[in-house]
Amino acid sequence: MTRRGWLGAAAGIAAVVGALALYDALIESDEERVERLVEDVAGAVVPARVTAATARWVDLSRQPLEISALGESLRYGPGDEEAFEERRRRGLAPLSGDRLRVLTHGVEIDGDEARLTMRVLGDRLGMSSVEWTLRRRGDDWLVSRLRVTR
């Protein structure tokens, strides 16, 4: 092969690699979408962040939610928005201002269901295991179950 041929082949390979990298950067996988929940959980527990995360991941009109935390289990569905908001505020009040660090996490996706497991450490909360079950609803992944254990 001539020098010109090698340069043409190299340019073609570079174009294919560049196109694949651009495609990967523009197309977000389901795993990457679910992992955004990790970013929303990690950090300061402040009302604005909690409200934004709730708006992004919870929609009781489209996906009922079960919460199991430290021996208590509650279920919310369409029409329970006010009760859910009140319980969320009361439940998170003791954590207000705490900082959560995600020590480990893993994502498993099986069709339209995803499971995100995390080990979190809070300044005041201490260490907890958190398991989120999410269901795909259209283009969104919504939390259907949250389980917190020590």
Image (cartoon, rainbow, N blue to C red):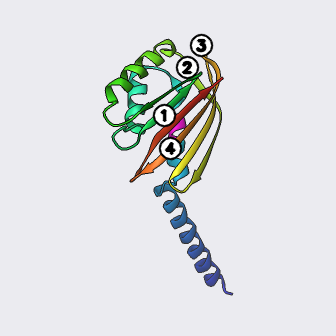
Work out which quarter of the rendered image holds the N terminus and state it.
bottom right
Q: How far apart are marks 2 and 3 (CA)?
A: 8 Å
Task: State the SS at label 2.
Answer: strand
Tag of residue 134? 4
Work out which quarter of the rendered image holds the C terminus and state it.
top right
Q: What residue type is labelled 1?
A: Glu
Q: What residue type is labelled 3?
A: Arg
- Specify the segment rendered in magenta: 36-40
Residue that numbered label 2 is attached to: 99
Mark 3 closeness class: few <14, some 14–19, many ≥20 residues within 10 Å: few
| Residue depicted at 61% across the width and 83% down the height | 4
| Earlier residue among tags 2 and 3 | 2
**Rendered view: 6 above or below 62:** below
Report the front residue among 78 and 57: 78
**Rendered view: 132 above or below 68:** below
Tag of residue 124? 3
**Pointer 2 with pointer 1, Cβ within 8 A:** no
| Residue depicted at 34% across the width and 30% down the height | 80
Q: Main secondary structure of the magenta part?
A: helix
User: Residue 41: x percent and y percent?
Assistant: 52, 30
Q: Disc 2 vs disc 3: which is toward the camera?
A: 3
Q: Which amino acid does label 4 sit on?
A: Leu
Q: How far apart are marks 3 and 4 (CA)?
A: 27 Å
